[in-house]
Image (cartoon, helix red, strand yellow):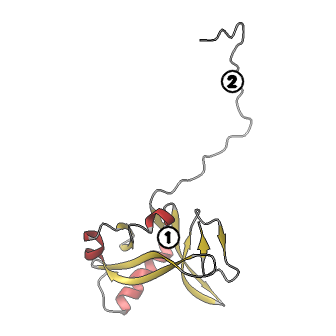
Amino acid sequence: MSDCGDVKKVFVASSVATAPEKIIVGVEISDVAADKIKLFLTNDNKSPEEYGLFVSVVKDGCSGKSYTMALDPIAPHKEAGDKVFSHNGATIMIEKLSYLFVTGSRLDYVEALTGSGFNLVNPNVKKTCACGSSFAI
């Protein structure tokens, strides 16, 4: 062990209290996205208790990866070991290998003049292509 002599530890309190950054474990579903999942399932005569939104990451686009999404039954995805998350009566299933790319993300639904749809806000993305349809981790 080293001898630090007369060095004394001094703790200085921060003058501004900052809240720690919110860390999302898994995938968060916004209230709007949950409502849209349930609406789309109901419009397709599918039960929100048995069906959900399946999300996977595939090799595609100029940046290398993109998302695919589809309304699928929940049970086969649970059996396959895919990650399952629920919020306000809506369920999303993330393909188990894709989960590594999307952990910490937030699923939202956006309506805009240029188009509407689900949007995965992914903190793991390092770059996207110019059109925004593909990404790189």
Checking the image for residue 30, the label placed there is: 1
Q: In the rendered structure, which amino acid carries the disc numbered 1?
A: Ser
Rendered residue at 58%/75% (across/down): 64
Q: In the rendered structure, which amino acid carries the disc numbered 2?
A: Phe
- Rounded to the nearest angstrom, the CA distance separating label 2 from label 1 is 40 Å
**Identity of the residue furthest to the bottom in this view:** 44
Q: Count neighbours of disc 2 (C-alpha within 10 A) and say few if under 14, some if 14 to 19, many if 20 or more.
A: few
Rendered residue at 51%/60% (across/down): 104
Q: Count neighbours of disc 1 (C-alpha within 10 A) and say few if under 14, some if 14 to 19, many if 20 or more.
A: some
Secondary structure of the residue carrying numbered label 2: loop
Determine whether 32 is above or below 4 in the image.
below
Q: Quadrant of residue 61?
A: bottom right
Q: Quadrant of residue 93?
A: bottom left
Rendered residue at 36%/78% (across/down): 52
In the rendered image, which quarter contains the C terminus? Answer: bottom right
Q: From the viewer's perspective, is 47 left or right of 32? A: left
Rendered residue at 35%/88% (across/down): 42
**Which is more N-terminal, label 1 or label 2?**
2
Q: Percent from the top left, x then y, of residue 119?
A: 55, 77
Q: Which residue is mark 2?
A: 11
Closer-to-camera residue (97/79)? 97
In the rendered image, which quarter contains the N terminus? Answer: top right
Q: Percent from the top left, x then y, of residue 3?
A: 66, 8
Q: Percent from the top left, x then y, of residue 19?
A: 62, 46
Q: Percent from the top left, x then y, of residue 98?
A: 44, 69
Secondary structure of the residue carrying numbered label 1: loop
